[in-house]
Image (cartoon, rainbow, N blue to C red):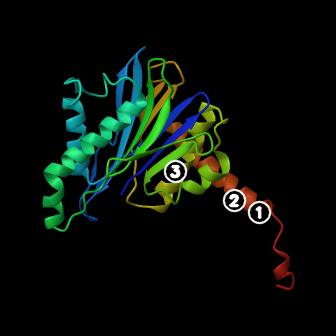
Amino acid sequence: MTYCVGILVHNGLVMIADTRTNAGIDNIATFRKLHVFEMPGERAIGLATSGNLSVSQSVLSVLEEGIANPETGQVETLYNVQNMFQAAHLVGRAIRRVFEVDGASLEQHGLRFDIKVLLGGQIGHTPMRLFHVYSEGNAIEATVDTPFLQIGEPKYGKPILDRAMSHEVDIRDALKIGLISMDSTLQSNLSVGLPVDVFVAQRDELKAAVRCRITEQDAYFRDLRERWSSALRAAHQSIPHPPYIENI
């Protein structure tokens, strides 16, 4: 299991992903799930994956090698597509190509062909966009009304995003809220774990503003989780007791 979240606000993009993979309680490892494709001044793209690790790695390999466009003959990669819609379409084609090779074999062995991708960023003067690409290769897009997308284990972090996130939130607050959402998932699900990778891009800057890995030793993240826990305790203590228990 994993947890990845992408947040698209008026002044930029935030993407956060954990790194834990497991095939049972005695087989836990760390693998990068958030990958950045960047040409400063020309494009900045983040790609996060959840699902079967072998499928995810195969899809990434196909994207790195590129896929020939049947109409133009050009080998397309995330470094030469012209806009983010084409990038999402390319990721979908890569997923379908891996399915053609491995899908039937996985199913014969009782394994599900399982991959989900968050793809966000900006290319040139085209709009900054954020997509969720499914195992079938189709995609949905974040909107002004729904500015965040999640893959993996969403339920622990989603209530925070539902209450606090909107398109008008500043990108710095979006990162803070995203990290609180990640911490809530870390606290409640042992299959999601540190380190956590972060990618932030400001709109029209066409480069990574933040590209870092947060570990257990990260002072800000420790302070954030302690402050959030304290704030929750203070909030529930400040709310009056329900009137239904006046005689208790």
- Left or right side of 93 for 150: right
Label 3 environment density (alpha carbons within 10 Å; few <14, some 14–19, many ≥20): many
Residue 217 shows up from this direction: no
The N terminus - image quarter: bottom left
Question: Please, is residue 32 above or below residue 126 in the view?
Answer: below
Identity of the residue drawn at 50% across and 49% down: 182
Q: Are marks 2 and 3 in contact (CB under 8 Å)?
A: no
Secondary structure found at label 2? helix
Q: Which residue is mark 2?
A: 233
Identify the amino acid type marked 1: Gln
Q: Which residue is mark 3?
A: 183
Identity of the residue drawn at 27% across and 41% down: 93
Identity of the residue drawn at 60% across and 32% down: 171
Q: Residue 158's x, y, as percent? A: 56, 55
- Left or right side of 117 for 73: left
Q: Which residue is mark 1?
A: 237
Question: Please, is residue 70 above or below residue 40 in the view?
Answer: below
Label 2 environment density (alpha carbons within 10 Å; few <14, some 14–19, many ≥20): few
Label 1 environment density (alpha carbons within 10 Å; few <14, some 14–19, many ≥20): few
The earlier-in-sequence mark between 2 and 3 is 3
The earlier-in-sequence mark between 3 and 1 is 3
The C terminus - image quarter: bottom right
Q: Are marks 2 and 1 in contact (CB under 8 Å)?
A: yes
**CA gap, disc 2 and disc 1:** 6 Å
Outermost residue, front direction? 71
